[in-house]
Amino acid sequence: MAFVWDGETQDNLDIYVKLIGPGPPLRLTTDPAWEHSAAFSPDGRTLAFARYGSGLTSDLYLLDLDEDLTPKGEPRRRTFAEDTTTSPVFTPDGRDIVFSSGPFGAPSLRRVPVSGSASPERLPFGERGQYPGISRQGNRLAYSTVGRILRIAVYP
């Protein structure tokens, strides 16, 4: 399980992972920025998360991991928007990430390839969408909207 924690320092939020069994959580990121919304790829080898920049803006980052969950290099920035980006979720095949992004309080659902081969695209549904979840088969997407209404959509 990946989670965000301040490590009891309360000066920034980093991404940690806790393996089942005894032992402390492992710290995966150490950037002075605040990080949030961590999600593993289906194969467990990539972690997607959001990192705050200035103000209420954040972008999507990807961190490649070894088998023992050691980071392989620095996180790769995947979005470059002046928006609030949150709640990444991988598609079951691990090729795309669906996430929420937009002005604070008015997000929409977007999709971006993990490969970096294309820019994020706004989905044709999901206006004011946040907290997406995708079924294991990849044919259903549930999300809430600002205002706490649950929506179910067929994806892609």
Image (tube, rainbow, N blue to C red):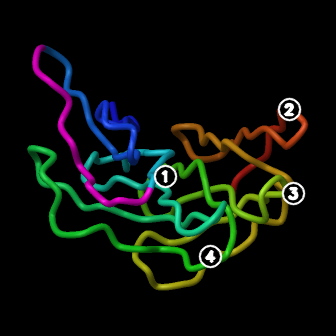
Magenta segment: does it hold 89? no
Quadrant position of the C terminus in the picture: bottom right
Q: Secondary structure at mark 2?
A: loop
Q: Residue at x 16, y 46 (%)?
A: 69
Tag 1: Cα neighbours inside 10 Å, few (<14), some, or many (≥20)?
many
Q: Position of residue 38 (x, y in %)?
A: 44, 45
> Could you say which disc has been placed on residue 148 in the image?
2
Q: Position of residue 53 (x, y in %)?
A: 53, 68
Q: Main secondary structure of the magenta part?
A: loop
> Could you say which disc has been placed on residue 120 in the image?
4
Labels 4 and 1: the sequence-earlier one: 1
Which amino acid lies under the numbered mark 3 shown in the image of this protein?
A: Glu
Gap in angstroms between the C-alphas marked 3 and 4: 15 Å
Q: Position of residue 101 (x, y in %)?
A: 69, 62
Gap in angstroms between the C-alphas marked 2 and 3: 13 Å
Gap in angstroms between the C-alphas marked 3 and 1: 19 Å
- Magenta region: 22-33
Which amino acid lies under the numbered mark 2 shown in the image of this protein?
A: Arg
Labels 4 and 2: the sequence-earlier one: 4
